[in-house]
Image: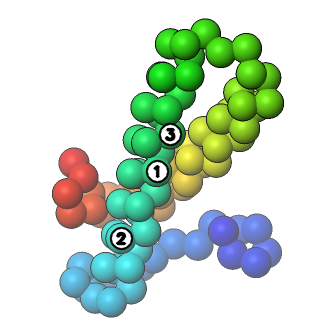
Amino acid sequence: MGPDGKPCYLSTDDQGGCVSRLADHIEAFQLGTASRLLEHARRILDNNTKDLKGLHLLAAQLTSALRDVLRAAKSRGGRPAAPGHP
């Protein structure tokens, strides 16, 4: 999001450009974070934890990761997936 709260989109025909590569790296990092959080959530839920503070923190982190992944998916539109991610 930009400073005014509106979405920011990368518009370029140069797939190998510096800004495109940076955007792809950030997106790959966000997807990796979401994947690790999902695995962490599976472990916590499989253990039937009673730690409400831990569950609240996990829910906040998962919400943030989901927001990032959805923002990337929406902004990607018709662009091909980031290298290494289908």
- Amino acid carrying label 3: it is Leu
- Give the Cα separation between the discs numbered 2 and 1: 12 Å
Residue 38 screen position, x and y as percent: 47, 33
The residue that label 2 is drawn on is: 25
The location of residue 20, given as percent across then percent down, is 34, 80
Assess disc 2: are there few (<14), some (14-19) or many (≥20) residues with their C-alpha within 10 Å of its C-alpha.
some
Q: Position of residue 63 (x, y in %)?
A: 65, 40
Hey, what amino acid is under mark 1? Thr
Residue 14 lies left or right of residue 10; in this view the side is left
Relative vertical location of residue 40 with respect to residue 76 in this rendering, above or below: above
Q: Is residue 25 visible?
A: yes
The answer to which image quadrant residue 39 occupies is: top left
Q: Is residue 32 left or right of residue 14?
A: right
Vertical position of residue 61 compared to residue 80: above or below: above
Near-viewer residue (32 or 71): 32
Could you say whether the residue bearing mark 3 is in a helix, strand or loop?
helix
Q: Are marks 3 and 1 in contact (CB under 8 Å)?
A: yes
Q: Mark 3 and mark 1: span between their CA atoms? A: 6 Å
Horizontal relation, residue 82 to residue 5: left or right: left
* Residue at image point 24% right, 52% down: 85
Compute the Cα span from label 3 to label 2. 18 Å
Residue 83, compared with residue 73, is above or below; it is: below
Q: Residue at x 71, y 27 (%)?
A: 55
Residue type beneath disc 2: His
> Which residue is disc 1 drawn over?
33
Between discs 3 and 2, the one toward the N terminus: 2
Q: Which mark is residue 37?
A: 3
User: In the picture, which quadrant includes the N terminus?
Assistant: bottom right
Q: Nearer the viewer, residue 77 or 36?
A: 36
> Crowding near pointer 1: few (<14 within 10 Å), some, many (20+)?
some
Which of these two is toward me, 77 or 31? 31
